[in-house]
Image (tube, coloured by chain):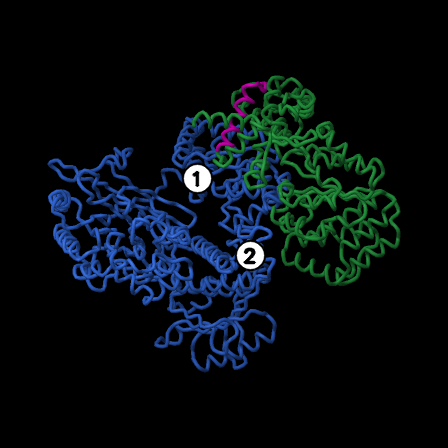
């Protein structure tokens, strides 16, 4: 087997290189598998046996110099280090560092296996080409399944060869089979139907054909109901063909029957419009597209701006509202309003219905459509605020059809927010799972449910298991035989043993609540505004945004801010994921305000996370005390049971942060003052101000938070108790 | 007599890309250095050093072509002539990824002071006092040890603090610029004071500057590094700089800017008129000696002659690449349980190398690679050119003119790609 040969050679190389400095780069498919790969390699090499010193994960600002120091402290034959610097700043800074410090690799006490993802490798090839020429080899890691198969084989070989005691120890180290906890009962899935592109219209000639296909579908669903009872129905656009009222009469009729045969309540049927749901006669005189981000923000933030474009969907709206409920979004709501949450078998499922057809008008829609970044942002905040454990997005068009200025961003955001993305439009089934450093989703494009019986007509049935984080798809197609609709083996031809169905795993994700997102946005603005020109230039260079010499630089503030925001956000999510104890449900565990020490606990926790995130972002050189303060607020909002109101930062007369609401008992409330400097007089003034506030809010907890970047690097955060001039006890956090 | 495994282990060590012959011998290159590898280039360099006591020279080149090794060797030779040579390893002393000119000059100063002390040449008392008072002002409080070595140690302490901590770095820069004199001026006066010993400052490690910063330092800034200081200065620069459109402005300040690139060992002789190449016996001989210098102390017969020739052809003349191929071949032989390195091992190592190129392959490379193969020319200053040169897809040679060729693994990959098309 190829992977065994691979490992044999790796082990031989490491064996020969023992005791001398050598660098071996091992490239894994993605960042998601690094952790698993590291432990698999430790297990494999230990079985050879080679004594492995696991250096863990590389800290964001540690390079070859630090690696060498670490390696000297360990009595191991081979060292193993995983590096997953966050993109884009972290990985660029990492590349710069390793390229500069490459000469220090000579101080390694033995061979070092550096485990990185393919993305990191690509950046290193571009930004640290010299560093890579110092590696004795750059090898590709076999896939996870092959690795685990190999370690099983090796472990059993060791067990057979060695004495039983040794073997027992071995399995203990590698988390062997004997210690697997009892299996939880299988999760009852949430079942859905995904239909798209029905193109219903009154037609004399093809009436019979249309009926045959769609009636067949209804018969099939009715017959299948006992075996596969549906919970949710999704229709991703093009219900009609020209957006006219008489077409919706047909669509309405079909939907009513669908609801009838499946038994799914109208409130659990979700629709979005497609390009054939707009009335092109109405749209003829309207704006064809937007040209900039600013225009998009206006269009999607102000309902008034969308008024005329909404009229193109009048027939769609009237008919669907009559059928499904007047207050349903159905793709006509934007941002938070696009999101609905349904509670099913203990899981909270969020469904965001997006309209990608605002600017659909003719056959040249490609590249003119907008979904609206504000729309995704608003949806994300709502989904997090609602505590949903699984999020589904519905849209008609694929990302490729969106305007180029938002296409990439919308896709990136979706990776962070959604678990399942359902779409249609191309009349072509397509399924894929996307895993990225931001998370990832399963994308399902349904084929046309009806496009004439001579073409393929199909749909998907699916099962969602939110706890297992999986989506299983069963593809169906129209066949003109006795059973009108049958399982389609052509979609997943390799999954014969799973009955031509396929199960996708959905990457874990952490969504940040809207208030947290807001604080991080402020942190990004503060960072960029406070960056001196040189630091700003460095940021731009890291983003490859420098304009070529001789050409005037445009204003890049907004883009840089956006990127910094994305980076801070990714770092915060990472810090939250790592810092979390317990909370297997995917929810961030919050400190309850019933805890008498809630303030002290949350101050420390928030300070720690703010600092970890700032360090993980790779932006340490640009982070100011101000940024840290905003990051602290966002972390506080994440770790403490709300409401947490950030009213102002540092300067104002009034309180800076208020915790709890007016109606609550004082011991559940707190007031916090934030200060940037650590000088004595600032502290005195702040304490006096706290006195004034404690008079206004008697009995509440109070704290003063002092942030300074230089301190943040030097020491751990600590909370002490100080007394105000009026004799109140106040917590003092130095960050 | 060592057993085969011990020999293989030793071979793996001396052929690792990280291995530096000079590690063995504390000062100057070790016994495995082959001076002919850079004969021509070194000749030119030494001529300028001889004739011009204020020469400012640049050294660029593909990764692994031997820049540092050659400079270490030059250092040793110059020291034997009695010249004061400050070989500044910027990497070890400063944070190269964020290098400011202040640290660069301070590091040079520290090295010069301790070299002056070692050479026992009298450093004029005035110069020493000047350095001392400057350093005291920089430090803020008195108490700098009097002799040159003491000053050098104080400077190094400053540098290592600044290397670890960006805040201290910023502070050092501000202080050096506002509090005291310009460090370049102090360095210049020090060099002036040592004039009789014909001082040479070698700044090795500037090639580790990130491309953008290198561009800013050399092409945007009016004050080019070391250009205004007296004495000889040799600076390693990143190859990317040579391929910048405005690189030629440097020829006003540096004497050899138009021939700064240290080429690969010439595996081929090139006839510019007929645009043909043929194998160069001299070049192959040099590369063979480079391998022998590392193999012979271990066991002269352990590598079969055919294997060395295959590895030489596979390396394209890049010394580090040659070492890497030899190392991989040793691993192959070990896995095969052989006791000699045979041509089949090298062949397998070249195939691995080809696969590694395949992973980094980008369709934009194809037309450029085909053109190199056809015409031995590499054109343009774009990203692709830089990537190809840095990634050793294309090897640069010079005899009078610069010309280019593909190493064996790339050639193999190209053929496979064309067949698949």
User: Where on the picture, by quarter, is residue A473?
Assistant: top left
Q: In the figure, is residue A722 to the left or right of A322?
A: right
The residue singled out by tag 2 in the image is A553
Residue B353 on the magenta segment: yes
Between residue A734 and residue A323, name the one nearer to us. A323
Magenta span: chief secondary structure: helix
Between residue A332 and residue B391, name the one nearer to us. A332
Expressed as whole percent of the image width and height from the top left, the position of residue A16 reads: 57, 28
Q: Quadrant of the N terminus of chain A?
A: top left
Expressed as whole percent of the image width and height from the top left, the position of residue A147 reads: 42, 34
Between residue A90 and residue B263, name the one nearer to us. B263
Between residue A260 and residue B389, name the one nearer to us. B389
Expressed as whole percent of the image width and height from the top left, the position of residue A20 reads: 62, 34
User: Where on the picture, by quarter, is residue A212?
Assistant: top left
Q: Label 2 vs label 1: CA separation?
A: 37 Å
Q: Quadrant of the C terminus of chain A?
A: bottom right
User: Vertical placement of A527 versus A103: above or below?
Assistant: below
The residue singled out by tag 1 in the image is A29
Which chain is mark 2 on? A
Q: N-terminal of the two: label 2 or label 1? A: 1
Q: Which residues are magenta?
A: B339-358
Q: In the figure, is residue A149 to the left or right of A279?
A: right
Kindly check if marks 2 and 1 are in contact, taking CB atoms under 8 A apart as contact. Answer: no
In the rendered picture, chain A carries what hue?
blue
Expressed as whole percent of the image width and height from the top left, the position of residue A690 reads: 50, 77
Chain represented in green = B
Q: In the figure, is residue A185 to the left or right of B343?
A: left
Which chain is mark 1 on? A
């Amino acid at each position: 087997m190829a992977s065994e040969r691979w490992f044999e050679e790796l082990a031989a190389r490491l064996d020969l290189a023992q005791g001398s400095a050598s660098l071996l780069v091992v490239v894994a498919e993605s960042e998601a598998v690094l952790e698993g790969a590291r432990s698999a390699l430790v297990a494999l090499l230990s079985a050879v046996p080679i004594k492995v010193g696991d250096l863990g994960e590389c800290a964001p600002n540690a390079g070859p110099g630090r690696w060498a120091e670490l390696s000297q402290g360990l009595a191991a034959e081979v060292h193993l280090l995983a590096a997953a610097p966050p993109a884009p700043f972290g990985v660029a800074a990492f590349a710069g560092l390793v390229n500069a410090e490459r000469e220090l690799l000579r101080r390694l006490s033995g061979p070092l296996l550096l485990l990185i993802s393919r993305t990191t490798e690509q950046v290193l090839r571009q930004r640290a080409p010299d560093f890579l020429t110092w590696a004795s080899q750059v090898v590709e890691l076999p896939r996870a399944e092959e690795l685990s198969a190999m370690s099983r084989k090796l472990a059993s070989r060791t067990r057979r060869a060695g004495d039983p005691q040794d073997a027992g120890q071995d399995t203990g180290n590698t988390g062997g089979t004997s210690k697997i906890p009892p299996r939880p009962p299988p999760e009852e899935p949430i079942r859905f139907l995904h239909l798209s592109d029905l193109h219903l219209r009154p037609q004399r000639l093809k009436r019979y054909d249309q009926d045959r296909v769609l009636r067949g579908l209804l018969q099939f669903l009715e017959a299948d109901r006992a075996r596969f009872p549906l919970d949710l129905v999704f229709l991703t656009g093009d219900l009609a063909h020209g957006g006219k009222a008489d077409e919706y009469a047909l669509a309405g009729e079909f939907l009513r029957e669908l609801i009838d045969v499946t038994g799914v309540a109208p409130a659990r049927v979700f629709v979005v419009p497609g390009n054939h749901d707009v009335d092109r006669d109405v749209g003829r005189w309207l704006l064809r597209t937007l040209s900039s981000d600013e225009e998009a923000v206006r269009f999607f933030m102000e309902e008034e701006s969308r008024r005329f474009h909404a009229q193109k969907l009048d027939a769609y709206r009237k008919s669907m509202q009559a059928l499904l409920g007047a207050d349903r979004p159905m793709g006509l709501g934007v941002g938070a309003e696009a999101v609905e949450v349904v509670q099913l078998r203990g899981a909270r499922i969020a469904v965001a219905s997006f309209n990608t057809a605002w600017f659909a008008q003719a056959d040249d829609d490609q590249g003119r459509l907008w979904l609206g970044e504000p729309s995704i942002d608003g949806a994300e905040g709502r989904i997090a605020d609602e505590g949903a454990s699984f999020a589904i997005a519905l849209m008609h068009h694929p990302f490729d059809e969106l305007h180029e200025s938002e296409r990439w961003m919308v896709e990136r955001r979706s990776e962070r927010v959604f678990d399942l993305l359902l779409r249609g439009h191309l009349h072509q089934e397509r399924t894929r799972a996307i895993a990225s450093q931001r998370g990832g989703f399963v994308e399902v494009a349904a084929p046309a449910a009806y496009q004439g019986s001579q073409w393929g007509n199909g749909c998907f049935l699916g099962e969602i298991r939110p706890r297992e984080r999986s989506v299983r798809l069963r593809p169906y197609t129209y066949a003109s035989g006795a059973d009108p609709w049958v399982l389609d083996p052509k979609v997943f031809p390799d999954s014969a043993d799973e009955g031509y169905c396929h199960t996708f795993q959905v990457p874990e994700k952490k969504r940040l609540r809207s208030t947290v997102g807001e604080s991080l946005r402020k942190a990004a603005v503060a960072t960029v505004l406070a960056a001196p020109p040189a630091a700003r230039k460095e940021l731009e260079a890291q983003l490859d945004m420098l304009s070529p010499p001789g050409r005037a630089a445009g204003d890049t503030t907004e883009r840089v801010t956006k990127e910094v925001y994305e980076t801070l956000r990714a770092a915060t999510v990472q810090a939250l994921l790592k810092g979390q104890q317990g909370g297997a449900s995917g929810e961030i565990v919050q400190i309850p305000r019933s805890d008498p020490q809630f303030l002290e606990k949350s101050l420390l926790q928030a300070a720690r996370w703010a600092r970890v995130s700032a360090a993980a972002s790779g932006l340490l050189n640009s982070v100011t005390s101000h940024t840290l303060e905003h990051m602290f607020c966002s972390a506080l909002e994440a770790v403490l049971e709300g409401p947490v109101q950030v009213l102002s930062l540092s300067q104002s007369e009034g309180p800076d942060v208020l915790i709890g609401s007016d109606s609550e008992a004082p011991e559940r409330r707190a007031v916090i003052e934030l200060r940037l400097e650590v000088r004595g007089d600032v502290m005195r003034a702040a304490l006096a101000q706290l006195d004034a506030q404690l008079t206004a809010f008697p009995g509440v907890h109070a704290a003063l938070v002092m942030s300074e970047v230089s301190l943040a690097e030097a020491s751990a955060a600590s909370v002490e108790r100080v007394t105000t001039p009026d004799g109140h006890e106040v917590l003092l956090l130095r960050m | 007599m060592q057993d085969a495994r011990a020999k293989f282990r030793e071979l793996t060590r001396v052929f690792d890309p990280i291995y530096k012959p000079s590690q063995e011998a504390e000062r100057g290159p070790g016994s495995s250095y082959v001076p002919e590898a850079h004969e021509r280039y070194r000749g030119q360099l030494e001529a300028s050093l001889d004739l011009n006591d204020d020469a400012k020279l640049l050294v660029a080149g593909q990764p692994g072509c031997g820049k540092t090794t050659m400079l270490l060797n030059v250092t040793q030779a110059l020291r034997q002539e009695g010249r004061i040579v400050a070989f500044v390893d910027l990497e070890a002393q400063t944070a190269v990824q964020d290098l400011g000119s202040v640290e660069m000059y301070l590091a040079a100063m520290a090295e010069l002071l301790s070299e002056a002390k070692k050479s026992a040449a009298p450093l004029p008392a005035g110069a020493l006092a000047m350095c001392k008072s400057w350093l005291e002002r920089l430090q803020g409080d008195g108490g700098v040890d009097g002799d040159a070595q003491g000053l050098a140690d104080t400077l190094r302490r400053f540098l290592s603090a600044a290397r670890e901590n960006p805040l201290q770095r910023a502070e050092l820069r501000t202080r050096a610029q506002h509090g005291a004199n310009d460090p370049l001026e102090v360095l210049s006066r020090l060099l002036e004071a040592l004039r009789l010993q014909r001082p040479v400052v070698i700044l090795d490690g500037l090639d580790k500057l990130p491309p953008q910063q290198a561009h800013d330092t050399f092409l945007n800034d009016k004050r080019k590094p070391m250009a205004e200081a007296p004495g000889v200065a040799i600076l390693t620069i990143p190859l990317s700089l040579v391929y910048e459109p405005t690189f030629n402005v440097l020829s006003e300040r540096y004497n050899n800017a138009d021939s700064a690139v240290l080429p690969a060992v010439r595996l081929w002789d090139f006839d510019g008129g007929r645009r043909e190449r043929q194998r160069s016996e001299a070049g192959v001989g040099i590369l063979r000696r480079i391998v022998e210098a590392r193999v012979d102390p271990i066991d002269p017969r352990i590598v079969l002659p055919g294997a060395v020739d295959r590895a030489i052809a596979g390396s394209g003349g890049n010394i580090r690449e040659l070492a890497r191929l030899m190392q991989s071949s040793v691993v192959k032989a070990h896995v095969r349980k052989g006791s000699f390195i045979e041509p089949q091992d090298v062949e397998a190592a070249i195939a691995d190398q080809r696969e590694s190129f395949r992973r980094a392959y980008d369709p934009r490379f194809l037309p450029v690679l085909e053109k190199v193969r056809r015409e031995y020319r590499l054109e343009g200053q774009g990203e692709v050119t830089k990537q190809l040169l840095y990634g050793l897809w294309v090897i640069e040679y010079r005899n009078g003119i610069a010309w280019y060729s593909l190493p064996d693994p790339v050639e193999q990959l190209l053929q496979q790609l064309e067949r698949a098309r």
